[in-house]
């Protein structure tokens, strides 16, 4: 019999995954700023401290670098920490430990250790928190061999990928868009994993492929639904993992549709769109392209405070509709 | 570690700490290892000069008593994190010089299979979690290892070695604070050799002694003469006892000096020849320890000569082992980036 499926929010799904991981393995524990009685800045840890105690749900001082290093040290010596950055922006303070230590330790030591570390990064704009609390920095970490970087887009995937991350022997960085935390969706009870490194075709289509990440998956699906009325049949690929990237799923999709658009919230240049586009240009799918590749990404600015401006600097559904309509010209 | 018998201990009642605490055999072993550290680094330096190895290296010649004194009370499964100047810590914690040379030579028999080199030598089986190329990078990691020890109730003590340069990094302060609030079994060991690369502690550090920083984190701050083995070992003993009793961390400042430059690029423009000469001639840690051993009757000239020649042989064998070992196959370049999964 299939596990019972309920509607949970993305935040509840993550919380449930962390509880399951702690129930299954006493080495798993949580660390972060104000994740105990406060419940986390976004209430993702919620009341877990009441169930697991302050020894396993550890409030750290406001010390991102030191805290990240403690998590690295605990991971290489037998524990399985899940570390929460309060905002992904604050991880800039901890880059040393993430990039120089966690990512490289296994390699530098010739395979003598593994670093089974999970880090969670509440990311993205749309909350009115302005330039230092709204960034999408996943491509920074996607550039570092030794790390795995994932961006689950649904409550189902948030739970399954977090459980896959905890089971993974290597450091896994999870970027969670803050606007997704309240989004509800079907989530099976109990333990299951969603594999790291596998994209998902959220909607099949013949006319053009949209490769999207995180919240942009939902915006792309909304755009695709709107364009269906105009006879434009869009395939939406949820990349889910940016390192290691599932190239084959994207290549196969582009070979089928011959048109590619990448939609992501992070700053457009030198990002995931560039990587996906270049990967396609290098692949056998290049010959199948009937139009130039289109990238829709964030503007080349910090995230502004004013709500109108804030919306304007990241792709919105009408932007995707307009760009997709343009790209689909001459399909039939 | 078995100590000296009671009768022997009584006869040594007025001697410095280590001569009361350890057997003659153990103390001779310490001298052996101090020579091993010195000759290993001289050997590595010579191999570099002769073009046999590439890259750079940071030599701890002059700091051997510090590494040995701190590691003396540690058990094999106690852990350390080390620094770019870490060969001494590695040997003191029990590493084999032949596998260290092999790492220098980039060979598959090296501790890191040729992937790490001098700056990343680790010996996890002996509790050395690794040297580190980032100043202060290992300090929070040691606190994490201390957290594991506490959570898993293993009783392990963790030592974090770092230099004076690290005491002005944020990671140092964040790590000491966390170790203190969680009462973790961690010993912070600042080997203050007077210079962070070229910048003296007087120019870089607002406090006179780095141990003074301990007060800010409610832990004992202990200053020792890092060139006197007994002083270092005694401070380490006390800190280990405190850590094992669950009373929390200690900061030990071991004041010492590096005879060599910061790395191979150093032209020694920031200190005088006289200063270097003074430390080499009058405060060399091996010379000091050797004369104490002689004076207190633990060893004679013949015994010292035997240690020196055994070390020379071990170094020569280690270099031969490294030379004869295979280089990694270039097709294995992707190995160890991620954990290989079945």
Image (tube, coloured by chain):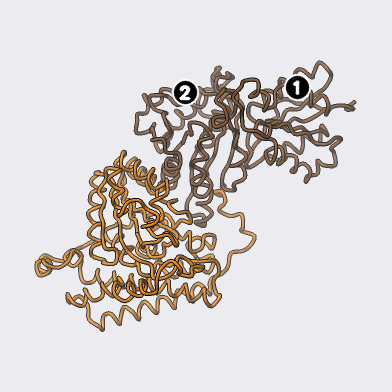
Chain colours: A brown, B orange
A317 vs A25, left or right, is right
| A217 up-or-down from B268: above or below | above
Residue at 59 percent of width and 37 percent of height: A137
Q: Nearer the viewer, mark 1 or mark 2?
A: 2
Q: Chain of mark 1?
A: A
Res B151 label: none
Q: Tell me the number on the disc at residue A43.
A: 2
Which of these two is toward me, B99 or A261?
Answer: A261
Q: Is residue A77 visible?
A: no
Of residue A318 and residue B105, the one placed in the foreground of this image is A318
Residue pictured at 49% horizontal, 28% vertical? A17
Please state the horizontal and vertical placement of residue A144, each as a whole percent of the image.
59, 46
Q: Secondary structure at mark 1?
A: helix
Earlier residue among tags 1 and 2: 2
Describe residue A188's horizontal placement relative to residue B122 as left or right: right
Query: Which residue corresponds to mark 1?
Result: A224
């Amino acid at each position: 019999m299939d596990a019972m499926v309920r509607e949970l929010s993305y935040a509840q799904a993550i919380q449930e995954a962390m509880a399951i991981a702690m129930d299954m393995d006493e080495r798993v524990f949580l660390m972060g700023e104000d994740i105990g009685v406060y419940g986390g800045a976004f209430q993702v840890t919620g009341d877990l401290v009441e169930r697991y105690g302050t020894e396993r749900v550890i409030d750290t001082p406001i010390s991102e670098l030191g805290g990240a290093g403690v998590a690295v040290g605990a991971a290489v010596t037998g524990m399985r920490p899940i570390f929460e950055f309060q905002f992904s922006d604050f991880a800039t303070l901890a880059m040393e430990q993430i990039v120089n230590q966690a990512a490289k330790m296994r390699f530098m030591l010739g395979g003598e250790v593994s670093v089974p570390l999970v880090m969670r990064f509440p990311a993205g704009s749309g909350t009115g928190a302005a330039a230092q609390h709204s960034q999408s920095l996943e491509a920074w970490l996607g550039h570092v061999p030794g790390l795995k970087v994932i961006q689950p887009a649904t409550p189902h995937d948030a739970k399954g990928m977090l459980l896959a991350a905890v089971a993974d022997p290597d450091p896994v960085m999870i970027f969670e868009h803050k606007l997704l935390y309240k989004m509800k969706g079907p989530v099976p009870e109990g333990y299951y994993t969603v594999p790291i490194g596998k994209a998902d075709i959220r909607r099949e289509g013949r006319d053009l492929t949209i490769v999207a990440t995180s919240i942009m998956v939902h915006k792309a699906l909304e755009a695709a639904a709107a364009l269906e009325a105009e006879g434009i049949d869009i395939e939406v690929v949820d990349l889910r993992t940016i390192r290691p990237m599932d190239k084959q799923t994207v290549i196969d999709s582009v070979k089928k549709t011959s048109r590619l658009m990448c939609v992501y919230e992070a700053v457009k240049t030198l990002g995931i769109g560039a990587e996906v586009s270049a990967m396609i240009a290098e692949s056998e799918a290049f010959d199948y392209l009937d139009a130039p590749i289109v990238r829709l990404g964030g503007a080349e600015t910090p995230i502004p405070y004013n709500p109108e401006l804030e919306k304007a600097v990241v792709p919105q559904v009408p932007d995707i509709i307009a760009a997709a309509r343009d790209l689909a010209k001459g399909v039939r | 570690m078995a100590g000296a018998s009671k009768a022997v201990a009584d006869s040594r009642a007025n001697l410095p700490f280590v001569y009361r605490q350890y057997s003659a055999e153990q103390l001779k072993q310490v001298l052996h290892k101090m020579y091993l550290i010195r000759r290993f680094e001289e050997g590595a330096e010579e191999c570099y000069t002769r073009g046999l190895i590439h890259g750079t290296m940071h030599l701890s010649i002059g700091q051997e008593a510090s590494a040995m004194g701190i590691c003396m009370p540690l058990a094999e499964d106690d852990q350390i994190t080390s620094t770019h100047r870490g060969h001494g810590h590695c040997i003191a914690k029990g590493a084999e010089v032949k596998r260290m040379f092999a790492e220098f030579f980039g060979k598959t028999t090296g501790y890191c299979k040729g992937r790490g080199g001098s700056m990343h030598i680790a010996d996890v089986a002996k509790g050395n979690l690794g040297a580190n190329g980032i100043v202060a990078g290992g300090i929070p990691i040691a606190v994490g290892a201390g957290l594991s020890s506490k959570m898993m109730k293993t009783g392990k003590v963790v030592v974090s070695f770092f230099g004076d340069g690290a005491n002005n990094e944020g990671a140092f302060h964040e790590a000491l604070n966390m170790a203190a609030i969680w009462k973790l079994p961690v010993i912070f060991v600042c080997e203050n050799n007077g210079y962070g690369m070229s910048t003296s502690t007087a120019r870089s550090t607002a406090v006179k002694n780095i141990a003074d920083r301990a007060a800010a984190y409610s832990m004992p701050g202990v200053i020792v003469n890092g060139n006197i083995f007994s002083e270092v070992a005694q401070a380490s003993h006390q800190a280990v006892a405190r850590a094992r009793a669950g009373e929390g961390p200690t900061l030990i400042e071991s004041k010492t000096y590096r005879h060599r430059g910061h790395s191979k690029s150093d032209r020694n423009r920031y200190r005088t020849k006289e200063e270097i000469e003074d430390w080499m001639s009058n405060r060399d840690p091996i010379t000091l320890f050797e004369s104490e051993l002689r004076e207190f009757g633990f060893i004679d000239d013949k015994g010292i000569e035997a240690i020196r020649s055994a070390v020379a042989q071990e170094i020569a064998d280690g270099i031969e082992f490294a030379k004869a070992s295979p280089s990694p196959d270039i097709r294995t370049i992707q190995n160890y980036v991620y954990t290989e999964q079945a």
